[in-house]
């Protein structure tokens, strides 16, 4: 996916290329999110309303990261 768009009910958070998928990546390694490559300054959009709980690059091996907590689906 190269543009921010809605696809099958999923809203992409930014225009960019997925460089690491969600889930098991290898022996004992799992990605708890997706990794999207984008140019510095690219706008990021939340897929749904929620609370920003982390912004930064302090977590080893994660690079720049934004974590949102979305309300539980009903």
Image: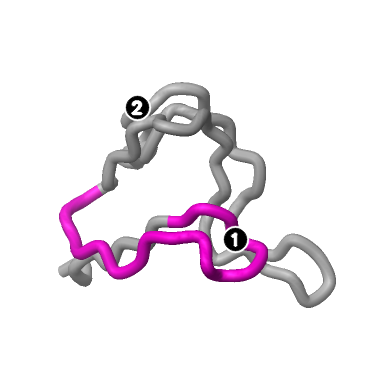
Q: Looking at the rendered structure, which numbered label has been put on residue 10? A: none
* Crowding at mark 1 (Cα within 10 Å: few <14, some 14-19, many 20+): few
Q: Residue at x 40, y 30 (%)?
A: 42
| Magenta-span inclusion, residue 50 | yes
Question: In the drawing, does residue 6 fall left or right of residue 59?
Answer: left
Magenta region: which residues? 48-65
| SS at circle 1 | loop
| SS at circle 2 | loop
Q: Residue at x 35, y 67 (%)?
A: 54
Which is more N-terminal, label 2 or label 1?
2
Q: Is residue 33 above or below residue 3?
A: below
Instruction: Please identify the residue farthest to the right as the structure is shown.
Output: 27
Q: Looking at the rendered structure, which numbered label has been put on residue 5? A: 2
Report the residue marked by disc 1.
62
Give the image quarter of residue 71.
bottom left
Nearer to me, 42 or 68: 42
Location of residue 30 in the rendering, given as x and y in whole percent from the top left corner: 67, 68
Looking at the rendering, in which quadrant would you find the C terminus? bottom left
């Amino acid at each position: 996916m190269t543009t921010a768009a809605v696809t099958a009910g999923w809203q992409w958070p930014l225009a960019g290329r997925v460089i690491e998928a969600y889930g098991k990546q290898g022996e004992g390694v799992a990605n708890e999110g997706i990794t999207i490559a984008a140019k510095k300054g690219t706008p990021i959009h939340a897929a749904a309303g929620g609370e920003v709980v982390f912004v930064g690059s302090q977590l080893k091996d994660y690079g720049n990261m934004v974590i949102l907590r979305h309300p539980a689906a009903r």
